[in-house]
Image (tube, helix red, strand yellow):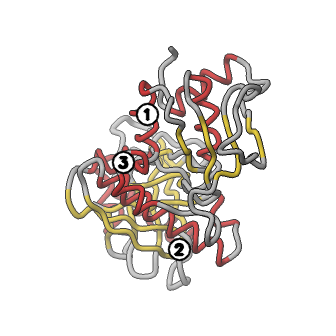
Amino acid sequence: MRWILRMGEVLLKSRPVRRFMRKALEKHIIAQVEVRGAKVKIRPWQGMLFLDLIEGDSEVVEDALRHSFGLISADPISSVDVDPAIVAASVISNAPKEEGATFAVQCKRHGQKGEWGSQSFAGAVGAEILALAPHLKVNLGNPQWPVRIALMPDEVGILGEKIICPGGLPTGVQGTVHTDIQNERDFLASWLVMRRGCRLSLSSETNTEFMDVITCWDPYHLEEKWRQKLATAPGPGHIGEIWAVVGDSLSNFDNLENKVPIANLEPLVGWSEDSLEILRQRAGIVKR
């Protein structure tokens, strides 16, 4: 099985920074998949990542993707020849049966343009679908059945149901921050900073009730093997160097080994309860 992985903010960076962040993201995804009992291979192409399942279940891979910062979405993909008739025949079993049901072919081209452009190919596939299912109608704005395809130079990818990922920056690329997670608000504050590319340095007094959800997002904290594989920082000599502390309230936070961090981060200041509930769902915790 194969997926197309889409990065967001990473692609806005300069070429050297983009390359550094992409490699960190690839290592992180591979680790996330392996700790869940599967193995994958990743190949970068045209600002995207192609991920192939080597061993294990697709469900655990998709769970790993949902818990990997730096990705905005992932699409299961099935490849067919660049032929509108073949594409239509491959998807027609998913067509709604009711008379007058609507559909639209949503095509995006990747790579060098060949014989087909995205609009012309979408139109040709749509015509083939109508020939196979004349009871359907076209609705480009709000179709009941969106047919999502990726047009590439040598193949067409038929996309499955989109997997929404957390976005942000890959874990660790923005250095290390220290936290003492004692309650839900401490964790949520730390999660927001993790999403901005920071790796957590956990105090020895961190509440162990939160370790399962922390390691779900970052296997670095599972064991030494993963700490060695995933160690990264925004520059040489910065791995493990703590540049900030993060939590819900840091008024009584002690200095670290007599070092004063550059910043105290309290990202939950001003958040409403409704916003916190949305954040809880995104971070994967239930209200305590």
Task: Name the quarter where the N terminus is drawn.
Answer: bottom left
The spot of residue 53 in percent (x, y) is 27, 61
- The residue pinned by badge 2 equals 110
Sequence-wise first label, 2 or 3 = 3
**Label 2 close to label 3 by CB (< 8 Å):** no
Q: Amino acid at mark 3?
A: Glu
Q: Residues within 10 Å of mark 2 (few under 14, many from 20)?
A: some
- In the foreground, 206 or 45: 206
Amino acid type at mark 1:
Val
Dot 2 falls on a residue whose secondary structure is loop
**Residue 22 placed where, x, y %?**
54, 68
* Left or right: 211, with 261 as reference point: left
Q: Nearer the viewer, mark 2 or mark 3?
A: 3
Give the residue at x 64% y 70%: 235
| Badge nearest the viewer, 2 or 1 | 1
**Residue 226 vertical placement versus 284 (above, below):** below
Tell me which residue sits at (70%, 66%) in the image: 12
In the foreground, 132 or 273: 273
Residue drawn at the location 73% of the way across and 34% of the way down: 267
Give the x, y percent position of residue 227: 42, 56
**Label 2 – label 3 distance at C-alpha:** 23 Å
Is any atom of residue 2 visible in this view? yes
User: Residue 52: x and y, percent?
Assistant: 31, 65
Q: Secondary structure at mark 1?
A: helix
**Horizontally, is 131 left or right of 247 in the view?**
left
Q: Amino acid at mark 2?
A: His
The residue to which callout 3 is attached is 62
Residue that badge 1 annotates: 213
